[in-house]
Amino acid sequence: MFSFLSKRFLQALLVLLGVSFATFIVGHLTGDPVELMARENATEQDKQDLRVYLGLDRPLEQQYFSFIVKAVQGDLGFSFVQQAKVSQLIAERLPATLQLAAAGFLLALAISIPLGIIIALNRGTIWDFLVTTLAMAGQAAPGFWIGLMLVVLFAVHLKVLPVSGYGGAAYIVLPAITLALQSSARLTRLVRASMLEVLSADYIRTAHSKGLRERVVLFVHAFRGAMIPVVTMAGLELAELVSGAFITETIFAWPGIGRLAVTAVSQRDFPVIQGVVLMSAAFFVLINFLVDVLYVVIDPRVKLK
Amino acid sequence: MIKGNWTRRLVLLAGLAMGVTALTPVYAQDAKPVVIASSEDIISLDPHMLDSNNPTGSAIWSIFDSLVRRDKDGQAQPRLATSWERVDDLTWRFHLREGVTFSNGEAFNAEAVKVNFARMDTAPFNSVQQLHDQTGLTAVNVVDDFTLDLVTAAPTVNMLYWLEEAFVAAPAYITDTAPDVVASAPIGSGPYKFVEWRRGDALVLTASDTYWGDAPAVKDIIFRAVPEMSSRLNELAAGTVDIVVGITPDAAAQANTDVSDVVQIEGLRKMHMGISIKGEQPALADPRVRQALNYAVDVPTIIDSLLGGSTKPLLSIVNPPNNNPDLTPYSYDPEKAKALMAEAGFADGFPLTIQWSTRFDGGKDVSEVVGSFLEAINIKPTYEAVEIGQFREALSSASLKGIYFQGWAALINPSVELVILTCGHVDNSSGYCNPDYDKLVIEASQTLDDAKRQELEYAAQAIIWNDAPWLYLWRLPNIFGISKTLSYEFRADNYLEPYLITYK
Amino acid sequence: MRRSATSVFLRRNALGLLGLTILVIVALAAIFAPWVAPYGPAKIDLMARLAPPAWIDGGSLKHLLGTDNLGRDILSRVIYGAQISLSVGAGAVVIGALIGSFIGLLSGYFGGIVDAALSFLVNVQLAFPFTLLAIFLLSTFGGGFTSVVVVVALATWVNYARVVRGQVMSVKNQEYVEAAKSVGVPTDRILRRYILPNAFSSIIVVASFSMAQAILTEAALSFLGVGIGSATPSWGTMLNDGRSYLQNAWWMTAMPGVATALTVLAGNLCGDWLQDRIDPRLRK
């Protein structure tokens, strides 16, 4: 088990290195960043000064190496455009993003797990059909569109919730629902399928035949078994909520990482883009690692390997 | 059972939502901060990184002073300098205000200005600041504590204009403090001082108790970033925002509510379709073709429908009151346009790429409408959205493809407005080049006699108007929403000066 | 509680057929747009701006689904929009399938260091925040049809690579493959003749889901303003156009949104159906 996890950990580190390298290369493939950062009518001398100031006059491999060395120490560089440390910019925005992701994730779990189990137990009924269809529809509609329609309904017409912004609890409702809808549509279907599979599995039949009470079978055995694929999927969903909330954050003016990044792209603020990419990749890798750990905890079969 | 739990959760959440709305604190009218909502984030509070008017510029204007203040009509007014004169053709002398202190207690004097101007001329600030490049400033000489000489390489009529955006920060603070602190906790001598900045959300300022001028009527100011226009309008109607910047003409009426009014200002930015003379369509090199484009588009109709009549067609490439009064807008005359096209040998038209960026609202709409008018003179348009960073790059290298939606020079200064179309000028994105025009413009910018200069500028305007390197459109309308409890005269250049806001 | 096998079978087929029907209708609308659509997609009428759909006060039968801010007919734009959205989807599916299957094939067949290297590539791609990568690439290299298709394909190739790799690994040690090897059939021929055909059915299943995913991704990118900027709108572009008109012209956003949702739903229904019919093992 230890070797399994340490191997995974090493893999995760390698992937991060790969991501940082790819980001760096892409950032430098797109031409001279100084051309884009300096004002439109800056003189050659102004541009050269900036190049030296930013350390862009050094050889590429030196730039990459120093980026990595600093990144390991938690220094993600300095945003020239905003005159601020990238690590601080990210740290300032991270709480908002995590709040939203957590709210969206919990909401998605709160909807999908009970709903998935209920319709699995009532398979073939009209409810099963309705919920499944609804979930498919939810999966099909663009998330941002649902967000906009929610705004029209709740904020513009009913005026019960704020259109957008950041502040009290009321502000998080619409963006969290927007984020949660698609995840919960996917997860509901997954919970249903995985529950159905487990219910027909041998060990559940055995449990039944041993005369265990229905409820015990259901919650102790079936639930635990059914959660294994759900945990993986939920992990992916969470990682996506954190790194993929760009559109939701834009629609709802949520001051998180996503908006930081989108603004940085239009400002050609490379250090910030690089930092955000690395941060979300790290988050993705971390969550996947945690999922692996959880696996070992929940699934007895993994331990045997 | 589980379902019941979930319903309870929802009820709880909704209850929470209403609770928050109900709990919003109620301020007495005068104590209530004025909240200004703009679409964009404030980027940096370092005054020497300033490159956009609102909201970053408005915040900088509130916290810092420049030597000279630009009023809403574009005239220079005393600020940190109380008066100024030309000593000779190359030297400007400024008499500075005495008794001014920065909000951290540092004293203002000529040396402080020198330190700031030197900082503006070093990397990275010199890649953003234009004072030195545009005025040819070569030396800043401290005559005494409150007298300063600025020496330029050649005579310039533009010194005051560029000084208006050259802000002076506390000299020891900007020298000794880490750059990220300077840019996030600014120290200036202006009417407001910094309180708190939650990036991407809100900047809080309060009236400075050490300000040299009259205390502003509004004590607390909050700049908020609210990217969605509908959100800004909703908040205005709900009273949680007092001033809204950036409203599209179609939504203007929504700013008229029980608690707020809409204010429409004919802006200064001259919107046009730039015509890329060295682009992929060689026909555009022919002035007759460029004139034909101008005759082919019904600008007044577009203004009346798409822009709700909120602005007027351009009269010249120089803003009033300095425009040449003999020039009139091109009429809508498709027949004349076709005749000009035929005369130039393009009766059958040609393919034309129309580009726009996200820099200005409605760029896509305008491009598509203009394209549909051009189809009537046999031009076959294709459309292309260009990402803002790339668009800027293409502008500065004059490498746009055909025609492109752009706005220039939201200012009142004929010299600065004219110079951008001289040969090879970095802002000359259309690639237009006419030596006769250049001669007039350069001579004007070095002519210190007002009447003589005006004559040269009128002549230059006439040349450019007929050569038509632009498809002339209109002045960008600025639409604001403001709470009925406040009064403020909005500026056409989109800067906001919160210290001039008063309660009704 | 359980229905008979036949009824379950029928219901599944019904949903799949429903999806297929919708897809066919959308595809036909796209192909025959010039004959079906009442107006051209770029036909501007500044006098008829922001007209509501026919069934709402102020609407007229001239514009069934209303008009947009330039007075263009929304029904026509939705119909023409299908051309762009479907071709982006199809283009991305083809490119994604080619790249992904190729990588999966190599990875699964050769195993060892090749597999490790390619799996590393897959993991790096997965760890990248896709939306940010897409915005960044499109904003620096420019939008336009081809680049959007390529970027959208970037989002999907991993799915093919994984599925194909699994399939290949399960057949590569089968006797007939070993036999072919032993008589000296060249590797590329083995891959083409004996290995790849086994993965076809899975590729088709992944493709039908990817098509749906691609349409959604294109809509999201256009919504962020980095999509295709052509006169013929994609549904995503229309959604973006309507964004500042949410309050006074909700139909500008609602109509293309419904079109997108229906098409994606149809794609997913087909995918589910194919999966059940062809390749139940893929079911998670």
Image (cartoon, grey):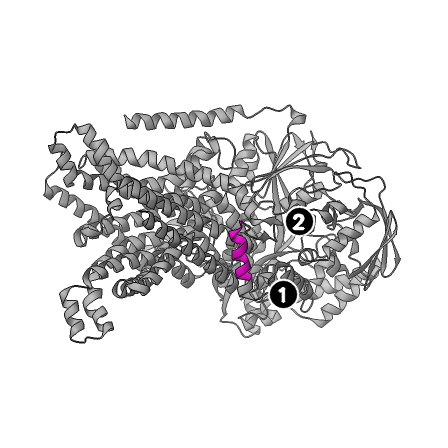
Residue B314 horizontal/vertical position (percent): 65, 55
Tell me if mark 1 has few (under 14), some (14-19) or many (20+) residues whose alpha carbon lies within 10 angstroms of its own: many
Amino acid type, mark 1 = Pro
Say which residue appears at 29% left-offset and 47% top-offset: C265
Visible in this render: residue A233? yes
Q: Main secondary structure of the magenta part?
A: helix
Which image quarter holds the C terminus of chain B? top right
Say which residue appears at 78% left-offset and 38% top-offset: B105
Question: Relative to B211, is B344 on the left or the right?
Answer: left
Please name whichever residue, B150 or C88, is drawn nearer the observer in this view of the structure: B150
Question: Relative to A88, is C123 on the left or the right?
Answer: left
Q: Earlier in the sequence, mark 2 or mark 1?
A: 2
In this view, the residue farthest toward the front is A2
Residue A163 horizontal/vertical position (percent): 48, 36
User: Which mark identifies residue A186?
Assistant: none
Compared with residue C57, is residue B352 higher up or lower down, i.e. above or below? below
What residue range appears in magenta?
A63-74
Compared with residue A269, is residue B433 higher up or lower down, i.e. above or below? below
Which residue is label 1 attached to?
B469
Q: Nearer the viewer, mark 2 or mark 1?
A: 2
Question: Relative to C236, is A65 on the left or the right?
Answer: right
Which image quarter holds the N terminus of chain B? top left
Which residue is label 2 attached to?
B179
Tell me if mark 2 has few (under 14), some (14-19) or many (20+) residues whose alpha carbon lies within 10 angstroms of its own: some
Visible in this render: residue A152? no
Distance of mark 2 from mark 1, alpha carbons?
A: 42 Å
Dot 1: what SS? loop
Dot 2: what SS? helix
Residue B270 horizontal/vertical position (percent): 64, 55
Circle 2 marks a residue in which chain?
A: B
Compared with residue B408, is residue A207 higher up or lower down, i.e. above or below? above
Amino acid type, mark 2 = Pro
